[in-house]
């Protein structure tokens, strides 16, 4: 299977749609500020790449959010690592997810 190849490609881009969480992302030119923009093929959301968030930070964030820690509190704990906005979209995914 070419599972490893696609996994590797995701490793390089590591992009997730902030709205629907899909990996199906296309480049969509640059913003006025000169940042690379991306478009989600699933929901057509256009967004700018977030700064890279390491897996351990994501795990901490997930743990906080799944233990009913409010987003502003989690944002204070993880200040400098993730944005409040990112935490909200992350939390949304938990609420929506099965
Ligand atoms: Zn999307």
Image (cartoon, rainbow, N blue to C red):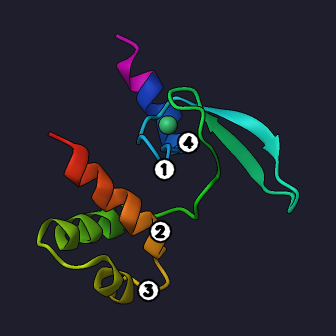
Q: Which residue is mark 4?
A: 12
Helix, strand or loop status at disc 1: loop
Going from N to C along the chain, the mark reached first, 2 or 4, is: 4
Residue numbers of the magenta segment: 1-5
Q: Which residue is mark 2?
A: 85
> Given this view, does label 3 or label 1 mark the residue nearer the observer?
1
> Could you tell me how far apart the alpha carbons at marks 1 and 2 are, in whole angstroms?
9 Å
Query: Which quadrant is the N terminus positioned in?
Result: top left
Q: Earlier in the sequence, mark 3 or mark 4?
A: 4
The earlier-in-sequence mark between 3 and 1 is 1
- How would you rate the neighbour count of disc 1 (Cα within 10 Å): few for under 14, some for 14-19, many for 20 or more? many
Q: Which quarter of the rendering shows the C terminus?
A: top left
Q: Residue at x 24, y 79 (%)?
A: 70
Q: Quadrant of residue 91?
A: bottom left
Q: Is mark 1 within 8 Å of ligand 1?
A: yes
Residue 91 higher or lower than 25, as above or below: below
Q: Secondary structure at mark 2?
A: helix
Residue that carries the numbered disc 3 in the rendered image: 79
């Amino acid at each position: 299977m070419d599972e490893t190849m696609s996994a590797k490609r995701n490793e390089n881009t590591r992009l997730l749609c902030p709205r629907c969480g899909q990996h199906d992302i296309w480049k969509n030119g640059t913003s006025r500020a000169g940042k690379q923009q991306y478009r989600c093929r699933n929901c057509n959301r256009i967004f700018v790449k977030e700064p890279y968030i390491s897996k351990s930070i994501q795990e901490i964030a997930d743990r906080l959010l799944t233990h009913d820690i409010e987003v502003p509190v989690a944002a204070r704990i993880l200040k400098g690592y993730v944005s409040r906005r990112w935490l909200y979209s992350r939390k949304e995914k938990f609420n929506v997810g099965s």
